[in-house]
Amino acid sequence: MAEKKTRKYMLPEDQIPEAFYNLAADLPVALPPVLHPGTGMPIGPDDLAPLFPMALIAQEVSTEREIEIPEPVRDAYRMYRPSPLIRARGLERALDTPARIYYKYEGVSPAGSHKTNTAIAQAFYNREEGIRRLSTETGAGQWGSALAMACAFFGMVCEVYMVRVSYNQKPYRRGLMEAYGASVYPSPSDRTHAGREILADDPDSPGSLGIAISEAVEVAASQDDVKYSLGSVLNHVLLHQTVIGLEALKQFDMAEDYPDLIVGATGGGSNFSGMAFPFIGRMLRGEQDVNMLAVEPTACPTLTRGPYAYDYGDTARMTPLVKMHTLGHSFVPVGIHAGGLRYHGMAPMVSHLLQLGIIDAVAVQQLDTFSAGVQFARTEGIIPAPESNHAVAVAITEALRCKESGESRAILFNLSGHGHFDIQAYIDYHAGKLVNYQYPEEEIAMALAGLPTVNAVVGD
Ligand SMILES: *Cc1c(COP(=O)(O)O)cnc(C)c1O
C-alpha cells in the first residue's frame, strides 16, 4: 500500500472547541497565592476589579476543568479557526531525519499570531460587563494589533502603549493597529504619571514592556470606564489559548499519531501553554505521556537563569506580586528582534510547571533562530515571526538528534505567528547586522537586587 503523504490536518468549523481547558483542575500542587503589592497579603477578586471584568477574574482563579466558550467568541474564531496542523514534510526531507515534525500554524489569524485567541475572548467578556474602552501595552505590536482588531469587532475603543523602540522600528504594526481603529502612543509617554517619571530620568528611554504595562494599568486604574487587558502571563490568557492544543489533540487523532515532544517559544508563556496544557492534562490524568520544551532567547533568559520568586509584573510596581521566574521588574532587555520574548517575567503557571519538573526549558541564540527561520521558509514556504523562530530552531535541533540516534519521534511545535511585518529583521540578518547576545551575569544580579522583600516572608 502506498504511504499516505498527508500534509495538512484540517478540522471543520464545527470542531472549534466548545470549552477552554483549565489546567488548574489537574495540577498536582496548587499555584502559590497572588499577593497585594501594598500589604503583601493574598489578594481577592475585589482587588482586581478596577482592572478586569468579573468574568475574567473568576477564570483567573477557577479550578473547573472546562470553561464554556461563549457563542459570540466561537463565532469570531470561525474567521480563522480551526488553524491547520501541518506535517513539515519539506523540512523533514531537508534534514533527512526519521523524526515526524508537525506544526500548528497560528499565523492564519487576521492579525498574524495566536494572540487573537485571547484578544477576542477578553474584548467579549469586557463588553458583556458594559466596558467600552480597553487600555493595553504592546512590544513588537502583535498583541496591540490583536486587541485592536478584537475591540473593533465588539465596538470598543482601544488605547495602546507601544514600547518606544518598537514604535519607531515597526511603523507597519502601528499602522495596522490604527487601521483597526486603535490609538497608539509610544511608551514611555507623557500621558501617565509612570511615563512622565521615566522620561524625567531618561528622556531617550527606549521603553520596555514593564514600563508600558505600568502606563496601561495606570490608565485603567484611574478611569472608571476603562479596563486593562494583558496579552500573556495571566491564567485566563493561557486558558483562552488552549483552543490551540484542544484542536491539535483532534488533529493528531486524524493523523493517527501523538507527539513525543512539544516545543514552544516562551515570552510570557501563552502560546506554549495553549499548545501544551491539553496534552499536559492528559499526562497528569495518567492517559498519555509527553515531553515539553519551552524555548527562550539567551538575551532574556527568564526560565533558564531567573530565580523563582515573587515579583511585580511591571516597572512602576503597580501590579500584584506573583511568584514566577523573573529577571527583576527593572530589567530592560537589549533590542533583539523577537520583541515578543523580551518580558522580564514568565507566566506563574509555566514557572510552576518548571518547578514541578513537568516541563523543561532551554535558551537559544538569536543567530541560530534566524538561520532556522530561513531554513523553514525555504522548505515550508512560511516565513515565521522572529519569536516563533525560537521554536523552529529547537524543533530542528531535536529532529537532528533523532537522525543521530535513529529514533523516529514525533515533534510538535507551535508556529505562533508569521513574520510578514518582521521582514526588516530578516534583511538585517542577511546583511550580517544581527548579533548573538548572552545577558551578562552582573546585569541580571543588578536587576534581581531590586526584588521585593516579600520573598523573605512568604517565599521559600
Ligand atoms: C507575543 C508572541 C510570542 C510570545 O508570547 P507568549 O505569550 O509567550 O506566547 C510568541 N510568538 C508570537 C508570534 C508572538 O506574537
Image: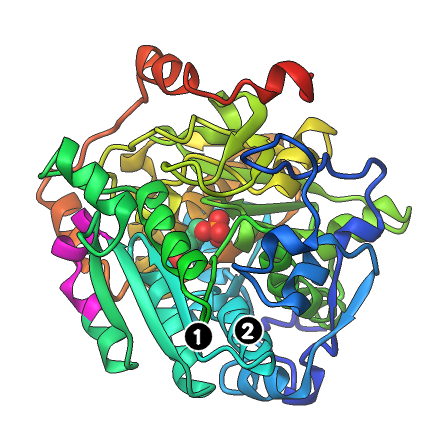
Identify residue type, mark 2: Pro
Identify residue type, mark 1: Val
Q: Nearer the viewer, residue 16 or 382?
A: 16
The stretch of residues the image draws in magenta is 163-174
Examine the image and state in which quarter residue 63 appears: bottom right
Per the image, the residue denoted by label 2 is 84
The disc at residue 360 is none
Q: Quadrant of the N terminus?
A: bottom right
For marks 1 and 2 on the same chain, the one whose residue lies earlier in the sequence = 2
Residue at 66 percent of width and 51 percent of height: 276
Q: Nearer the viewer, residue 68 or 437?
A: 68
Q: Position of residue 91 (x, y in %)?
A: 44, 55
Q: Position of residue 244 (x, y in %)?
A: 61, 65
Examine the image and state in which quarter residue 398 appears: top right
Per the image, the residue denoted by label 1 is 108
Question: Horizontal placement of 363 versus 56: left or right?
Answer: left
Looking at the image, is 311 positioned above or below residue 58?
above
Tell which residue pokes out farthest to the right in this image: 286
Residue at 54 percent of width and 35 percent of height: 37
SS assignment at label 1: helix
Task: Verify CB contact (< 8 Å) between mark 1 and mark 2.
Answer: yes
Q: Residues within 10 Å of mark 2 (few under 14, many from 20)?
A: many
Q: Residues within 10 Å of mark 1 (few under 14, many from 20)?
A: some
Colour setting: rainbow
Q: Is mark 1 within 8 Å of ligand 1?
A: no
Counting every numbered tag in the picture gives 2
Residue at 8 percent of width and 44 percent of height: 431
Q: CA distance from mark 1 to mark 2?
A: 8 Å
SS majority, magenta:
helix
Q: Is residue 7 visible?
A: no
Q: Position of residue 9 (x, y in %)?
A: 61, 74
Residue at 51 percent of width and 22 percent of height: 452
